[in-house]
């Protein structure tokens, strides 16, 4: 089985590359001289990221893609393969934050979230996988969310999709053992990106920079861990919640980990 390789000269597809974590990951991979295929819907934003990647010395291809469309995802994977003749890494980062209170939840909310956060990831994984299996070498990296480890109030549609994606990845990772194809699921807590730009959060779950997630992804390409949870407080909270979900719920309630849009709930430390 091939040993872990740095991204140098490897073909890396990054979805959600126009903004936030995907953008930071593309730039971090470019700094390691990866070949980058950048995907998202906003072509102008992708071109800007591609220019930054090229300035860092990497090859970069822009492929405007709506990941909720299987046909567009197939075109994305084919474009990368046609250009470089292999697919080494997929970073499935495209996502949307769909929230709804349980009493107002609709099937449409769930469908909207699943379309991008679950199927948008799964289409990419399943289209890239045959190339990786043929090569007996490849790494699928899914950016899900700490929410998939501990759902928060209001986040039902988002969590349902992220938990489905991480659950599927957990099974596939074990199915693929020994094939040369690796899967890492990344579970970031709050990250300072437009996705949650208007959401205020308590100091205990302060937003981390997208570059921190990008650095963790680049490291994961070397170490191939099954999972990455970040930052440290999120790992700690995950262990607490695993031992006692009741205690986990209590922390969420008291610390208002779900965040808020306006004003500050009583007892919350303002950032
Ligand atoms: N920010 C956080 O606190 C946080 C925490 C945990 C996990 N995450 C996850 O990290 C990932 C990246 O989010 P972010 O925080 O970097 O948010 P962001 O800055 O809003 O980026 C989201 C990216 O997804 C792309 N996207 C959305 N819908 C798409 C679609 N239908 N087809 C193709 N691309 C689509 C967007 O590009 P276009 O609009 O150009 O299509 C954009 O590039 C998401 O999966 C998110 O769930 C974020």
Image (tube, rainbow, N blue to C red):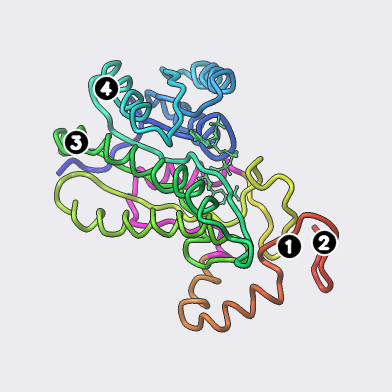
Residue that carries the numbered disc 4 in the rendered image: 81
Q: Is residue 25 left or right of residue 80?
A: right
User: What numbered label is drawn on residue 130?
Assistant: 3
x then y, percent, for residue 136: 15, 38
Element under disc 3 = helix
Q: Residues within 10 Å of mark 2 (few under 14, many from 20)?
A: few
Q: Earlier in the sequence, mark 1 or mark 4?
A: 4
Q: Position of residue 226 (x, y in %)?
A: 33, 56
Give the magenta-colored segment's residue range.
210-234
Q: Earlier in the sequence, mark 1 or mark 2?
A: 1
Circles 3 and 2, Cβ within 8 Å, touching? The answer is: no
Q: Earlier in the sequence, mark 2 or mark 4?
A: 4
Mark 1 lies on residue: 203
In magenta segment, residue 131:
no
Mark 2 lies on residue: 270
Q: Nearer the viewer, residue 59 or 202?
A: 202
Q: Main secondary structure of the magenta part?
A: helix
Apparent side of residue 87 relative to residue 210 in the rendered image (left or right):
left
């Amino acid at each position: 089985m091939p040993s872990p390789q740095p991204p140098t000269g490897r073909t890396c597809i990054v979805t959600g590359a126009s903004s936030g974590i995907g953008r930071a990951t593309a730039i971090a991979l470019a700094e390691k001289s990866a070949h980058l295929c950048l995907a998202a819907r906003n072509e102008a934003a992708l071109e800007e990221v591609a220019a930054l990647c090229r300035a860092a010395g990497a090859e970069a291809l822009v492929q405007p893609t709506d990941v909720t469309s299987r046909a567009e995802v197939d075109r994305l994977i084919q474009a990368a393969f046609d250009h470089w003749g292999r697919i080494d890494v997929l970073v499935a980062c495209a996502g949307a934050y769909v929230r709804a209170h349980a009493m107002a939840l609709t099937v449409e909310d769930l469908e909207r979230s699943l379309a991008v956060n679950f199927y948008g990831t799964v289409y990419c994984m399943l289209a890239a996988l045959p190339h990786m299996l043929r090569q007996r070498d490849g790494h699928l990296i899914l950016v899900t969310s700490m929410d998939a480890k501990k759902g928060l109030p209001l986040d039902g549609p988002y969590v349902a999709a992220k938990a489905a994606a991480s659950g599927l990845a957990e099974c596939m990772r074990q199915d693929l053992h020994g094939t040369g194809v690796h899967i890492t699921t990344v579970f970031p807590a709050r990250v300072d990106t437009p996705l949650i730009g208007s959401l205020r959060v308590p100091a205990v779950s302060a937003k981390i920079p997208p570059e921190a997630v990008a650095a963790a992804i680049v490291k994961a390409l070397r170490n191939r861990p099954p999972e990455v949870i970040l930052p440290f407080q999120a790992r700690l909270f995950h262990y607490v919640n695993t031992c006692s979900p009741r205690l986990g719920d209590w922390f969420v309630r008291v610390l208002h980990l779900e965040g808020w849009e306006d004003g500050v709930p009583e007892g919350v430390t303002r950032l």
